[in-house]
Image (spheres, rainbow, N blue to C red):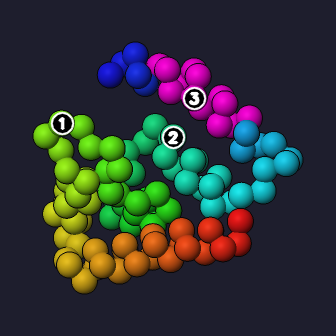
Amino acid sequence: MEARNSYILYTVLPTFKKRLMSTETIKPLDSLECTLAFDPRDWSLSKRDAWLYGIICGWENEDPLEGETEDDAINEICEKHGFDKKRLKQLRKNYLKLKEYENQVF
């Protein structure tokens, strides 16, 4: 895990930073998503951070490891912060609406 973190810190992040800071790149939602996704902090710790991360990046695991499912992370977040099914549905709608908007505008 430490080698992976070093790779992200010294290889992936500088590449993303260069791309996101380019004057030719005008994709604010992509910039927000990359900023959150590659920030080393744990976005699940506070309810507010988890909500923002869920809207911008989504909590669904698109590439689950063996023994995991796509919903493991979101189920953990809901349990940790007391999000009921209605709140989870609202979070997913916000995420999908933002992605829809991003695809239409950018």
Residue closest to the eye, 62 or 5: 62
Q: Which residue is mark 3?
A: 12
Task: Using the image, determine if residue 8 lies above or below residue 48.
Answer: above
Horizontally, residue 38 falls left or right of residue 1, namely: right
Q: Which numbered disc flags the more N-terminal residue, 3 or 2?
A: 3
Q: Which numbered disc flags the more N-terminal residue, 3 or 1?
A: 3
Labelled pair 2, 1 in contact (Cβ < 8 Å): no
Residue in view at x 65 percent, y 37 percent? 16
Horizontally, residue 41 falls left or right of residue 88, namely: right
Task: Using the image, determine if residue 25 lies above or below residue 75.
Answer: above
Q: What's drawn in magenta, residue-wise?
A: 6-18
Distance between the Cα atoms at labels 3 and 1? 24 Å
Task: Using the image, determine if residue 79 lies above or below residue 91.
Answer: above
Labelled pair 3, 2 in contact (Cβ < 8 Å): yes
Q: Residue furthest top?
A: 3
Neighbourhood count class around disc 2 (C-alpha, 10 Å): few under 14, some 14–19, many 20 upward: few
Q: Which mark is residue 66?
A: 1
Q: Main secondary structure of the magenta part?
A: helix
Residue closest to the eye, 41 or 93: 93
User: Looking at numbered disc 1 in the image, what kind of residue is underneath it?
Assistant: Glu
User: Looking at numbered disc 2 in the image, what kind of residue is underneath it?
Assistant: Phe
Q: Which numbered disc flags the more N-terminal residue, 2 or 1?
A: 2
